[in-house]
Amino acid sequence: MIKSVDLQNKYLARELLKLQRASYLIEAKLINFYEIPPLKESIEELTNCGESFLGYFEGDRLVGALSYTITQGEVTICRLVVHPNDFRKGIAQRLLKEVENTNMEINLFKVATGKENPPAKNLYLKNGYKLMNDVEIVPGLFISNFTKCRDEQ
């Protein structure tokens, strides 16, 4: 089941922090970069990040989450995490669809991932996102930027 995650709930905030660390550690290994900000984030930084969170729950267990912001009529997906034990179950895809369905009035969606993260890149491409560019954010580390525009569907 997908529902909003209230980060003021200390238990859920701690569970989300554990989930994102487990998930981003896999990406860090794929892209060979261990300074991904969510790997270093404190509980206080997470709860004050200003992002809206959707959680994917199996029973009471949080197994996936997506966070986003809305500015100037566009959704920016900030985080998309799934627990490694729950990879390849369609959880990330369901979370992507939910953020799109929850924001039907918005036409433009943006997301970025490590250039060397084929599973994430394939997920976005499969769901109608277009690769816009690759940007070197620190020496040797490239991020792939994607957009999805409903008008182009």
Image: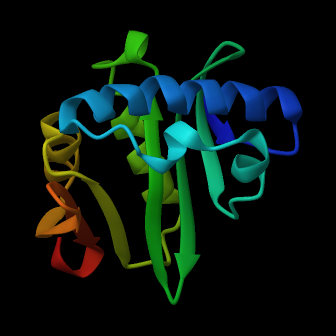
**The C terminus sits in image quarter:** bottom left
Residue 91 shows up from this direction: no
User: Could you say which quadrant of the image residue 123 lies in?
Assistant: top left
Q: In the image, residue 12 lies at what x, y percent?
A: 77, 30
- Looking at the picture, tell me which residue is in the foreground, 87 or 96: 87
The residue positioned 79% from the left and 47% from the top of the image is 44
Q: In the image, residue 105 lies at what x, y percent?
A: 50, 78
Q: Is residue 34 left or right of residue 67?
A: left
- Above or below, comparing residue 78 to residue 91 in the picture: below
- Above or below, comparing residue 141 to residue 119 in the picture: below
- Looking at the picture, tell me which residue is in the foreground, 40 or 101: 40
The residue positioned 65% from the left and 32% from the top of the image is 16
Q: How many marks?
A: 0
- Above or below, comparing residue 90 to residue 110 in the picture: above
Q: Is residue 14 left or right of residue 134?
A: right
- Above or below, comparing residue 48 to residue 23 in the picture: below
User: Could you say which quadrant of the image residue 150 lies in?
Assistant: bottom left
The residue positioned 69% from the left and 25% from the top of the image is 15
- Looking at the picture, tell me which residue is in the foreground, 37 or 114: 37
Residue 98 shows up from this direction: yes
The residue positioned 56% from the left and 68% from the top of the image is 69
